[in-house]
Image: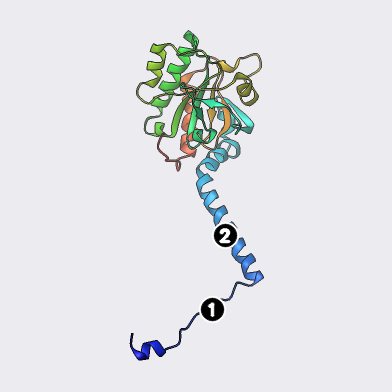
Amino acid sequence: MSEKSSAEPLSMTVHSAPLPGERAAMTRRGRWQALGVVLICAMPVLASYYSFYVMGLSGKAYGDLIVPTVDIPESLSLRDLAGQPVSVASLKGQWLLTVVQPAACDKACENQLFMQRQLREMLGKERDKLDKLWLIPDDEPLRPELQEAVSKGIPVQTLRVPRTELEAWLKPAAGAKLQDHIYIIDPVGRWMLREPVDPDPSKIKKDLDRLMKANAGWDKPGR
């Protein structure tokens, strides 16, 4: 090192801490920015609700609109067919076409699962916005051929949930049973539609078409 450089004094820049008023302004700005991000992410879902509840589409819905909507319980005890726990958060991010049927799955159950598959396919290019979900309220094993059937193509997400927990969340229509309906859950995890007993698939599709059209900005691919 040269004598000139060694003789030069070190200089340090001291930055003053923000004043209390400045800190408050920075905090407010950060909160507004975070709120803006949340609103942008929520806009597609909000648009669908606007269409149903504000623009009058609610009167045209084939299924029963759930007012107010019911959040999926964060404490819901979900397990896959191998018995491994599944987080509630993993169900969010897609529309869910949901059936509740026992593992024994009789003819009516098989028909409902077939309808669930066909409804998704009938959506065409919009189908990747919709997942198929089968909630099983018991611990009985699935028949091998049935397990193979729900695993073909785009598989049905099949999860076990205690019946008491399901009954505390989803409600059938008066005089009906939990397994009599198809339930529609939105991407935020809210139950918002219950389709009728013995439904007309073409009319359920119209409900789904309206949701997908109102929710055109939601383009997250299927899981």
Callout 2: helix, strand or loop?
A: helix
Horizontal and vertical percent position of residue 177:
61, 15
What residue is at 40 percent from the left and 37 percent from the top? 221
Horizontal and vertical percent position of residue 79:
51, 25
- Residue at image mark 2: 30
Labels in figure, total: 2
Identity, as a three-letter code, of the amino acid under mark 1:
Val
Between tags 1 and 2, which lies in front?
Answer: 1
Between 223 and 193, the one nearer to me in the picture: 223
What residue is at 54 percent from the left and 30 percent from the top? 185
- Residue at image mark 1: 14
Q: Earlier in the sequence, mark 1 or mark 2?
A: 1
Identity, as a three-letter code, of the amino acid under mark 2:
Gly
Vertical comparison of 199 with 20: above or below: above
What residue is at 62 percent from the left and 67 percent from the top? 23
Mark 1 and mark 2: span between their CA atoms? 25 Å
Image quadrant in which you'd find residue 174? top right
What residue is at 66 percent from the left and 70 percent from the top? 20
Q: Is residue 82 left or right of residue 185?
A: left
Between 16 and 93, the one nearer to me in the picture: 16
Vertical comparison of 210 with 159: above or below: below
